[in-house]
Image (spheres, helix red, strand yellow):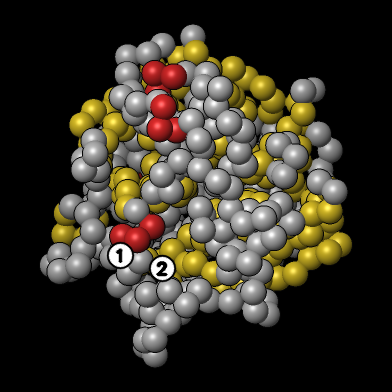
């Protein structure tokens, strides 16, 4: 039996669609229909609007699954699957598993709710007076500390700036009154704000930030180590005041670089995740006009990795020649083609319900709701890819529960679980 474990753990139709958009996706109306993406030929579908972890934790990060080595990673993408509707919300954006195994879901407007046998429960966190849903903004990310002592939240405040905060968890109960702000960042535009957060296998907190917005990275943030924009940050939320920078972050001794940066060259890492068993990092980076991309690296390889934006869009040159240290995607597809316009990253499947998918990376696209899968070999090369024949709608996020099973969040409000057919 698969050992339970805590998950290593957009919003208006227009917002999400703009995630992969081009140059003019800055002024998106919250209630605008998905068609708005077409109005911005050079803009990405908006992310949250869009598609456009601690070393000294008391218990430390979860131990690897002891049964993992007993199962061979040889996915069969011809398996028949189904989507089971389990609940609905007005605009779900993210989710995470609490210390008692409860799955919590965030709504873009600023509330967090438990998922119960009867559906979505009453809000246990309410930030609706502190966030805006303009552009690609809102409550965008959730994660629990490795020891279950805190809930981390990522949202955009009334000024549109990124805020990452922690709320205490006592006796499996979230205590919003016991809150501390960890990290804030002024955002120059209303799109490409990223917003995803995850607790890694090292127990540290990872923060995904887009290039700050505007089509084509006008600030050239992607290749600029002096700004946290366009980068994946890594901090220790349980050390320092309000946090500490891990000593092994790649740029801690570089006066010209931001200490918190782990990797850079990202356009808008709307969703990223860690393989619950191997610890590998998967980043789905929303493209500009040409390519949607999937990046996969080990934690060791992630340190100092340059994923190329804005010199590169996937494997194509965009605003210059390819950097010498470019880490190319393991998979890419055409933006605006049959496969969609704004990638939504998911997880490597490690559940028991669909053993044929064990080890496959599942993802989707906001503009094409088909659930898809990638299979990689021992060298990390994609050897098979395809869709699973089920459409989850305007997919803005995947959520992994404590058994490794996956839920999909549809901007239209539907929450489904991936099940065997």
Using a 10 Å C-alpha cutoff, classify the residue at mark 2 as few (fewer than 14 neighbours), some (14 to 19) or many (20 or more). Answer: many
Is the residue 244 above or below the residue 139 in the image?
Answer: below
Residue positioned most to the bottom: 255
Element carrying mark 2: strand
Q: Nearer the viewer, residue 49 or 392?
A: 392
Label placed on residue 262: 2
Marking on residue 391: none
Residue that badge 1 annotates: 305
Mark 1 neighbour density, 10 Å: few (under 14) some (14–19) many (20 or more) = many
Give x and y (percent) for residue 128.
Answer: 76, 54
| Cα distance in 3D space between marks 1 and 2 | 8 Å
Tell me if residue 234 comes above or below residue 421 in the rendering: below
Asked which secondary structure carries label 1, the reply is loop
Q: Do residues under tags 1 and 2 come within 8 Å of each other at their CB atoms?
A: yes
Is any atom of residue 212 visible in this view?
no
Residue plotted at (54% across, 69% down): 235
């Amino acid at each position: 039996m698969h050992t339970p474990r805590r998950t290593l753990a957009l919003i208006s139709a227009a917002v999400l669609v703009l995630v992969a958009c081009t140059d003019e996706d800055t002024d998106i109306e919250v209630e605008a229909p998905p068609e708005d993406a077409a109005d911005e030929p050079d803009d990405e579908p908006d992310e949250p609007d869009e598609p456009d972890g601690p070393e000294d934790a008391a218990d430390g990060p979860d131990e690897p699954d002891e049964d993992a080595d007993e199962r061979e990673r040889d996915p069969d993408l011809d398996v028949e699957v189904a989507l089971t509707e389990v609940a609905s919300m007005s605009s779900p954006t993210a989710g995470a598993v609490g210390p008692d195994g409860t799955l919590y879901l965030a709504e873009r407007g600023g509330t967090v709710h438990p998922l119960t046998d009867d559906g979505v429960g009453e809000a246990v966190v309410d930030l609706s007076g502190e966030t805006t849903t303009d552009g690609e903004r809102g409550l965008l990310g959730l994660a629990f500390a490795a020891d279950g002592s805190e809930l981390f939240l990522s949202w955009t405040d009334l000024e549109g700036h990124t805020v990452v905060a922690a709320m205490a968890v006592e006796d499996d109960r979230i205590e919003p009154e016991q809150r501390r702000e960890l990290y804030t960042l002024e955002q120059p535009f209303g799109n490409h704000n990223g917003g995803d957060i995850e607790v890694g296998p090292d127990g540290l907190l990872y923060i995904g930030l887009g290039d700050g917005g505007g089509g084509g990275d006008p600030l050239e943030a992607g290749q600029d180590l002096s700004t946290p924009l366009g980068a994946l940050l890594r901090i220790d939320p349980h050390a320092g005041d309000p946090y500490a920078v891990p000593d092994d972050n790649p740029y801690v001794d570089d006066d010209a670089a931001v200490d918190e940066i782990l990797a850079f060259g990202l356009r808008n890492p709307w969703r990223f995740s860690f393989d619950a068993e191997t610890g590998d990092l998967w980043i789905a980076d929303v493209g500009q006009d040409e390519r949607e991309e999937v990046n996969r690296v080990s934690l060791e390889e992630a340190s100092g990795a340059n994923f190329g934006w804005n010199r590169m869009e996937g494997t194509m040159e965009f605003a210059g020649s390819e950097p010498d240290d470019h880490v190319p995607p393991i998979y890419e597809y055409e933006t605006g083609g049959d496969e969609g316009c704004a990638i939504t990253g998911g997880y490597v499947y490690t559940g028991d319900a669909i053993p044929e998918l064990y080890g496959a990376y599942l993802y989707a696209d906001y503009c094409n709701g088909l659930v898809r899968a990638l299979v990689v070999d021992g060298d990390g090369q994609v050897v098979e890819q395809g869709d699973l024949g089920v459409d989850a709608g305007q997919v803005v996020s995947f959520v992994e529960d404590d058994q490794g099973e996956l839920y999909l969040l549809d901007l239209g409000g539907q929450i489904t679980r991936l099940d065997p057919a």
